[in-house]
């Protein structure tokens, strides 16, 4: 039992600094649209949607369907940048929506702890707020009855 708990704790601590990947039950386009709708309802700003696969096609290359939505909260982001300007390299927040090699649609984003650890932030409550928001957004965005 102790070994199982130890493995679980190590897994959780490793997971906290990694990229989180979730499956979506929607198409790439519908997942992106769902994220945009959720983000807008939360009064966050959508800055851009980057069509990676579309860009690859323009240069004669193939890439599985892939789009990145960039969004954020200027008040929260500014307060983090006031503490450590280099976090601006990783803000606004982004979620990558893509079709994997098995044809499944996935959503990927960085755990907020990564931001804190790589930019030496002391902002646990703000990082937890980011994590909660990203988790809720992706959970909801990946739910579709029919595409």
Image: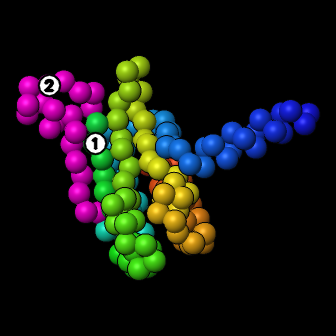
The residue at which mark 1 appears reads as: 67
Can residue 52 be seen?
Answer: yes
**Real-space Cα distance between discs 2 and 1?**
16 Å
Quarter residue 43 falls in: bottom left
Q: Is residue 83 above or below residue 17?
A: below
Could you say whether the residue bearing mark 2 is in a helix, strand or loop?
A: loop
Q: Nearer the viewer, mark 2 or mark 1?
A: 2
Residue 64 shown in magenta = yes
Residue at the spot 48% in from the left edge and 57% down from the top edge: 118
Which numbered circle lies on residue 96?
none
Residue at the spot 42% in from the left edge and 36% down from the top edge: 106
Q: Nearer the viewer, residue 71 or 112?
A: 112
Residue at the spot 81% in from the left edge and 39% down from the top edge: 6
Q: Nearer the viewer, residue 103 or 71?
A: 71
Could you say whether the residue bearing mark 1 is in a helix, strand or loop?
A: strand
The spot of residue 75 in percent (x, y) is 40, 79
Q: Is residue 73 above or below residue 21?
A: below
Circle 2 residues within 10 Å: few <14, some 14–19, many ≥20: few
The residue at which mark 2 appears reads as: 61
Circle 1 residues within 10 Å: few <14, some 14–19, many ≥20: many
């Amino acid at each position: 039992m102790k070994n199982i708990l130890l493995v679980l704790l190590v897994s959780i601590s490793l997971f906290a600094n990694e990229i989180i990947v979730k499956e979506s039950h929607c198409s790439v386009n519908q997942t992106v649209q769902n994220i945009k709708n959720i983000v807008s309802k939360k009064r966050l700003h959508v800055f851009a949607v980057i069509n990676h696969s579309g860009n690859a096609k323009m240069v004669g290359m193939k890439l599985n369907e892939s789009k990145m939505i960039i969004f954020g909260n200027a008040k929260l982001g500014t307060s983090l940048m006031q503490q450590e300007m280099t976090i601006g390299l990783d803000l606004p927040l982004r979620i990558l929506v893509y079709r994997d090699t098995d044809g499944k649609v996935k959503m990927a984003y960085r755990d907020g702890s990564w931001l804190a650890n790589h930019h030496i932030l002391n902002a646990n409550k703000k990082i937890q707020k980011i994590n909660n928001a990203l988790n809720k957004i992706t959970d909801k965005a990946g739910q579709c009855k029919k595409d």
